């Protein structure tokens, strides 16, 4: 009986501490103060709190870990909830930009974020133009819709997919809207800003950003123009990837640092490092 009582007491103690832990987690995830809420809404011109938090998360998405992190790729989930990871990202961002690292949203922090943003929604060190598909000056972000209307191209892609036992319907880039593509690019830009800062503000060169399907499948610059080698579901087709290099900085170090910046896909090949935000698109992390 005594043993049972002891077991019961221990069980209760565990339950209580678990509950406390849960309460703490819940408190942390909802602890946006009203003054923070007002600051955020004003900064982004958004009346909905969740959407305003999302805009903040996109901008500090590369700071969930600091430059010393060596674990698995991790990202800040863009969910509009002010949880512990968002607080940590704010803290790391503040620390990097010499702002008192409180994890609290204040005007100084928002001003610094704002200074990293351009009026066209790109970031201060990256432009929409450099993310557009290489190989043509006439392509717009809209062109990606076209493929759904081109029977011969659809047939070709379906044949390649069938040969590799890849589901044709998993190739969602074919139906991605301009808005979706540009949103992915915007998220990549903000994480690249974090990467740039963490490597000592060295300029990052971009060799490939968003890829138009015809360029991806046919250009001699991509897979030698050989459709049998092509990656059918490349993150570049979604605007969710960047091929980069930094002068005087090794690809291995660059790739490792990208892991701390919310990139969840990465490998280095020859003269560049490929990084992408595949987990934002619901895919598992892939790092080589
Ligand atoms: Zn790539």
Image (spheres, rainbow, N blue to C red):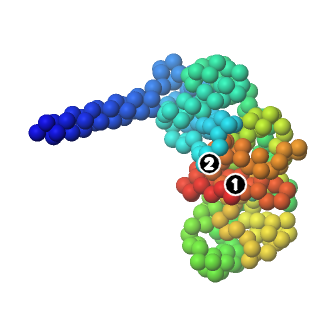
Asked whether the residues under the numbered discs 1 and 2 touch, taking CB atoms below 8 Å apart as contact, a structural biologist would say yes
Q: Which mark is residue 73?
A: 2
The mark total stands at 2
What is the quadrant of residue 140 in the picture? bottom right
Q: Is residue 269 visible?
A: yes
What is the quadrant of residue 269 in the picture? bottom right
Q: Can you give x and y, in whole percent of width and height, for residue 266 in the image? A: 69, 54
Apparent side of residue 73 relative to residue 83 in the rendered image (left or right): right
Q: Can you give x and y, in whole percent of width and height, for residue 172 in the image? A: 60, 63
Q: Is residue 11 above or below residue 243?
A: above
What is the quadrant of residue 112 in the picture? top right
Instruction: Kindly give the residue lying farthest to the right in the view shown.
Output: 248
Apparent side of residue 47 relative to residue 156 in the rendered image (left or right): left
- Secondary structure beneath dot 1 equals strand
Q: Nearer the viewer, residue 212 or 170?
A: 170
Apparent side of residue 153 relative to residue 271 in the rendered image (left or right): left
Q: Which residue shows up at 85% across the image and 65% down it?
A: 221
Q: Nearer the viewer, residue 259 or 128?
A: 259
Q: Which quarter holds ligand 1?
A: bottom right
- Secondary structure beneath dot 2 equals loop
Q: Can you give x and y, in whole percent of width and height, for residue 250 in the image? A: 83, 48
Does label 1 point to a residue whose CB lies under 8 Å from ligand 1?
no
Q: Which residue is mark 1?
A: 266
Q: What quarter of the picture does the N terminus occupy?
A: top left
Instruction: Kindly give the residue lying farthest to the front in the view shown.
Output: 2
Q: Which residue shows up at 74% across the image and 49% down it?
A: 255
Q: Which residue shows up at 67% across the image and 69% down it?
A: 232
Classed neighbour count for the residue bearing mark 1: other residues with Cα under 10 Å, few (<14), some (14–19), many (≥20): many
**Distance between the Cα atoms at labels 1 and 2?**
9 Å
Label 1 vs 2, first from the N-terminus: 2
């Amino acid at each position: 009986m005594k043993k049972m009582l002891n077991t019961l007491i221990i069980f209760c103690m565990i339950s209580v501490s678990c509950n406390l832990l849960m309460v703490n987690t819940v408190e942390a995830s909802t602890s946006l103060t009203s003054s923070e809420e007002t600051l955020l809404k004003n900064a982004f011109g958004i009346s909905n709190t969740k959407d305003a938090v999302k805009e903040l998360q996109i901008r500090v998405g590369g700071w969930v870990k600091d430059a010393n992190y060596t674990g698995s790729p991790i990202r800040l989930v863009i969910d509009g909830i002010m949880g512990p990871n968002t607080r940590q990202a704010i803290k790391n961002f503040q620390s990097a930009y010499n702002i008192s690292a409180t994890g609290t949203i204040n005007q100084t922090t928002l001003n610094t974020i704002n200074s990293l943003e351009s009026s066209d929604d790109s970031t201060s060190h990256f432009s929409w133009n450099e993310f557009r598909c290489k190989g043509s000056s006439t392509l717009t972000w809209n062109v990606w819709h076209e493929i759904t209307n081109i029977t011969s191209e659809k047939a070709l892609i379906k044949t390649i997919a069938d040969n590799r036992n890849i589901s044709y319907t998993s190739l969602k880039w074919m139906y991605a809207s301009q808005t979706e593509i540009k949103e992915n690019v915007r998220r990549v830009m903000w994480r690249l800003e974090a990467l740039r800062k963490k490597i000592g503000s060295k300029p990052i060169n971009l060799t490939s950003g968003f890829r138009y399907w015809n360029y991806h499948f046919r250009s001699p610059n991509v897979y030698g123009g050989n459709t049998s080698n092509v990656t059918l579901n490349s993150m570049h087709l979604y605007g969710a990837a960047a091929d980069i290099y930094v002068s005087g900085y090794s690809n291995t170090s660059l790739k490792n640092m990208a892991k701390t910046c919310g990139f969840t896909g990465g490998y280095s090949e020859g003269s560049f490092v490929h990084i992408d935000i595949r987990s934002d698109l619901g895919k598992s992390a892939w790092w080589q």
